[in-house]
Amino acid sequence: MTDLGYRYRLREPYGNPQERGAPPPVYSRTVEHGMIIERNVSVGLRDGVRVYADVFRPVDERPGPPIVIWTPYGKHWYGALEKDPHTAVREGMLSHYATFEGADPLYWVPLGYVIVNVDARGTWYSEGTSTFLSPEEAEAFYDVIEWAGVQKWSSGKVGLTGVSYLSQSQWKTAALQPPHLAAMNIWEGWSDTYREVARHGGIPDTSFWTKVVANAWGVSTHPIEDIVQETLEHPLFDAFWASKVADFSKIVTPAFIVASWTDQGLHERGTLEGFKQIASPQKWLEIHGRKKWSYYYEPFSVARLQAFFDKFLKGVDSPVGTWPKVLLEVREKYYVGAQRGEDEWPIARTQYTKLYLDAKGGRLERAPLPQAASCSYDALGGGPGAHRAEFDYLFERTTELTGHMKLKLFMAAQSADDMDIFVGIYKFDAQGRHVPMAYYTYFDDGPVALGWLRASHRELDRVRSTEHQPVLLHQRELKLEAGKVEPLDIEIWPSGTLFEAGARLKLIVQGTDLQKYSKTRHPVYTRHEDSVNGGRHVIHTGGATGSYLLVPVIPAR
C-alpha cells in the first residue's frame, strides 16, 4: 500500500463479530431461489490483506455484471429496516438476502446481475486496520472492484450502489478511476465529513458522529480508526478532514445520484455537492422528499436504477437516454409532492429574492426596512423571556421555493465571545397549522430546511462561496467582542417546497437544536449539546443592519 500522507489514530474495536451475531467466516456454496450463493469468499488486496465477500450469482453460471456493495455494517445484517415502521419500508419491499442499505439479490440476480456484498477492510472478519472514508479504504475498495471485474462469473463491467455509507465510500474510490468501474449509484452519501456531519456550521455534532462508529461501524477483530478522539483533536478543517474528501474532478464514471430534501443534517448537502462537482460527462440527479431507505426499495426507484445499470453495465437499450438531467420533487406536505424534470442543478432560472427581517413586527418583508430595530432571545432557551426569534412571510400567490437559501444576520452576543445559532424554515398553512415534512429517515414532523453557524467559524471561503450559498473556511476561530454587532452568513441546506397562496413561511432562529427527539429511541441522530452559548443573542434588522433571508423563487417555464 502506498504512503498516503496521513496517519490515523487507532483504537480497539467496540465489539467483536461473534458478540454482534456474525457467523464465522467459513466458505460455503449453496443454491437458493435460483441463485448460487457463495459466502465468505476471500478477496486479496494489494498488501496481502484479505477481505470477505458474499457473492450472489445466476444459477446458469452465465457471466453477468457485478454490483459491488461495500459495507461496514456487516454483510450478514438483514431485515433491520422492515422491523421499524418509522422507516416506511413495507413488508415485501425486499427479501432477507438484502444486506442493510444494499441492493436485493433476489431482484437483481434473476436479471443476470451478480451481487457482491463485501465487509469493508478491517470491519467484522475482514483483515487489516479499519479507517473510514480514508485513502486506504478507497484503495481497498478499488482492489475489490478490480477483483470482481476479472472473475469467471463477471462480464467485466462493475457497478456500485447502496445507501449512506455504501454511497459515500464510493466518492474517493471512483476518483481513483478503477478500470473495471463502469457505473456508480450514489444514494444519499455525504461528501464532506467535516461540514456535513461532524461540524454543522462549525458546531460539533455530539450524537450521530460520536455514536455511529460504536453502534454500527466499529465491529472488528483488528484495530479501528478512533474517530471520536480524532474529532476532538481536529476542531478545524485541516489535513485530517481533507483526507476524507474526494477529488471530484477525477470522477468520470457514469453516475446516477439520488438525494432527498429530507436528510437535513446528514446526507442531503453532500450528495448535491458531489453531483455538482464530479467531472462525469454522463450524470443524472434525482431529488425526492421521502424517507431515503423506503425510497431506495420502491419499485419505481428500483426500475430507474435497473434502467441505469442496463445501459452502462449491459449496454442494452433503456430509458436513460430520455431522462432529464435532473428529476426533482416539489413538496406540498408530508409525502405529497409533484416530480418535474430540469436541465441542471441548481436551477438556472432561479430568481433569488431577499426577504428582510423585521425585528419589531416579527415579519419578513419584500422591501428593506429604513428603521433599525432589534430583538433578542435567551441563548440556551432556559432563561426568562423569549427563547427564539420568529419571522413570518405570507404568500399572496402560490410560489415555489426550490434551491439554496441563505440567512444574512447582523447579530451580537450580549455576554459571550461566541454564539451557536440554529436556523429553521417551516411551512404553515392558511389556518396557521404547521405543515410537516418527512425528515431524517424516521420522522414525520420535519422542517422545510435547516441551517447552523458557530459565529467564530464565520470566515467565508471567498473562492467557493456564492451569493446564495456561503461556504465557510473553518480554518481559524474568530471570537466575538461581547455586545458588538457582526455580520453572519448562514447556509441553509437546499429544499424544494410549494407554498400555496395564503400559506406562510416561518423563519426560526434560536440557540439550540430545533428538532429534538428521544435519545433512547433514536440515539444515533444529529444533536449539538456542546454549546458555547450564554446570555442573550440579539438580532438587528433594518437600516444599516438589514438582516435578510435569501430565497430561491422558481418561475414557471
Image (cartoon, rainbow, N blue to C red):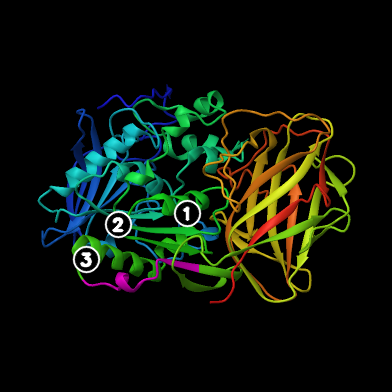
| Region in magenta | 317-328
Q: State the residue position of label 3.
A: 110
- Indicate yes or no whether the magenta region holds residue 323: yes
Dot 3: few (<14), some (14–19), or many (≥20) neighbours within 10 Å?
Answer: some
Q: Position of residue 514 (x, y in %)?
A: 70, 49
**Up/down of 63 relative to 504, above or below:** above
Relative image position of residue 450 (x, y in whole percent):
64, 52
Inspect this view and state whether residue 265 appears.
Answer: yes
Residue 338: image location, x then y, percent: 53, 74
Separation of disc 3 and disc 2 at Cα?
A: 24 Å
User: Which-is-in-front pick, marks 3 and 1?
Assistant: 1
Name the disc covering residue 272, or none.
1
> Which comes before the other along the chain, label 1 or label 2?
2
The residue tagged with tag 3: helix, strand or loop? helix
Residue neighbourhood size for the residue with mark 1, other residues' Cα within 10 Å, grouped as few (<14), some (14–19), many (≥20) = many
Q: Residue at x 68, y 48 (%)?
A: 516
Residue at point 70%, 45% (across, down) = 422
